[in-house]
Image: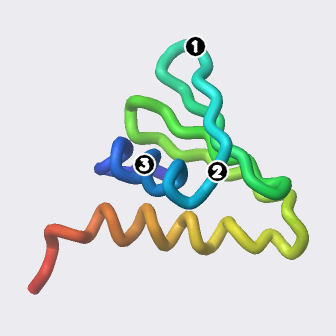
């Protein structure tokens, strides 16, 4: 999925206590409780949720969706 505000998304993960590890080519690996969320400077977000009950995947998708639609207030 794509996040139009990748810097804000990354900051949210940091603020929520996710561990962040910078990788080559503009990738940051974020991890918490068995969930890995890779973000790229291009805005791509890849979620690999192996946490108990896959409890983070939907929440992360909702954050991306919210950030992508934040300026689309009717």
Instruction: Identify the secondary structure beneath mark 3.
Output: helix
Q: Earlier in the sequence, mark 2 or mark 3?
A: 3
- Which numbered disc, 1 or 2, marks the residue closer to the eye? 2
**Inter-mark Cα distance, 3 to 1:** 19 Å
- Nearest the camera: 70 or 20? 20
* Front residue (pair 37, 12): 12
Indicate which disc residue 18 carries. Answer: 2
Whether residue 11 sits left or right of residue 53 in the image: it is left
Residue at the spot of label 3: 11
Is residue 35 placed above or below 20 in the rendered structure?
A: below
Position of residue 25 relative to residue 20, above or below, is: above
The number of numbered badges drawn on the structure is: 3
Which residue is drawn at the image coordinates 84% and 54% (left, top)? Answer: 34
- Quarter of the C terminus within the rendering: bottom left
Q: Secondary structure at mark 2?
A: loop
The mark that comes first in sequence, 3 or 1, is: 3
| 28 to the left or right of 10 | right
- Residue visible at 66% across and 52% down? 47
- Residue 12, located in which quarter of the rendered image? bottom left
Q: Position of residue 36 (x, y in %)?
A: 73, 47
Counting from the top left corner in percent of width and height, residue 51 is at: 85, 63
Inter-mark Cα distance, 2 to 3: 10 Å
Which residue is label 1 attached to? Answer: 24
Please give left or right for residue 10 compared with residue 30 in the image.
left
């Amino acid at each position: 999925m794509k996040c139009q505000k990748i810097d804000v998304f990354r900051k949210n993960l940091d603020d929520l206590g996710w561990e962040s590890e910078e990788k080559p080519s503009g990738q940051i690996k974020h991890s918490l409780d068995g969930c890995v969320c890779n973000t790229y400077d291009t805005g791509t977000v890849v979620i690999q949720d192996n946490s108990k009950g896959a409890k983070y995947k939907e929440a992360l998708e909702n954050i991306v969706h919210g950030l992508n639609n934040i300026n689309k207030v009717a």
